[in-house]
Image (spheres, grey):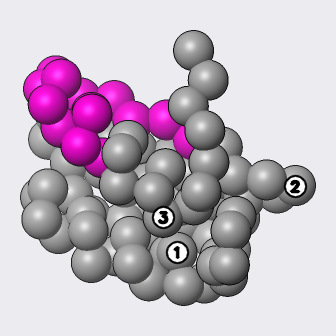
Amino acid sequence: MINKKIEDLYKELDIIIKKYGLEKAWFSDSLHYIALGENTSFYVKKKNGVIGFVTSENQKVVVELTNIITDLTGTVIER
């Protein structure tokens, strides 16, 4: 991550998920951030870098959340 602490990222994600009607899963911890909703979910893991994925029935939501998360973390999308 570029100039960010993982705690800051998780605090920002707490705010972002509300806009998409998601809730942080109770089993999230300091390494894993899981957010779940009716048709959307995402997972972010911080270990020796940041990895994750976004799933949704709505392609627009996938693109938006992916862009937000990659901007926050400074990561690159690998396809």
- Which stretch did the figure color magenta? 52-65
Q: Is residue 73 visible?
A: yes
Seen at 49% across and 35% down, the residue is 53
* Amino acid type shown at disc 2: Asn
Please tell me whether residue 6 is drawn above or below residue 1 in the rendered image.
below
Cβ atoms under marks 3 and 1 closer than 8 Å: yes
Question: Which comes sooner in the sequence, label 1 or label 2?
Answer: 1
Question: Does 17 lie within the magenta span?
Answer: no
Which of label 3 and label 1 is nearer to you?
3
Question: Which comes sooner in the sequence, label 3 or label 1?
Answer: 1
Quadrant, the N terminus:
bottom right
Which of label 3 and label 2 is nearer to you?
3
Q: Position of residue 25 (x, y in %)?
A: 41, 61
Please tell me whether residue 27 is drawn above or below residue 48 in the rendered image.
below
* 11 on left or right of 59: right
Seen at 79% across and 53% down, the residue is 49
Q: Which mark is residue 77?
A: none
- From the image, tell me which residue sits under label 2: 48
Please tell me whether residue 12 is drawn above or below residue 1 in the rendered image.
below
* Amino acid type shown at disc 3: Leu
Q: Which mark is residue 9?
A: 1
Label 1, label 2: how far apart the Cα atoms are? 15 Å
Q: Assign a secondary structure to mark 2.
A: loop
Estimate how packed mark 1 is, as few (under 14), some (14 to 19) or many (20 or more) residues with alpha carbons within 10 Å. Answer: some
Q: Position of residue 18 (x, y in %)?
A: 17, 69
Q: Position of residue 78 (x, y in %)?
A: 61, 23
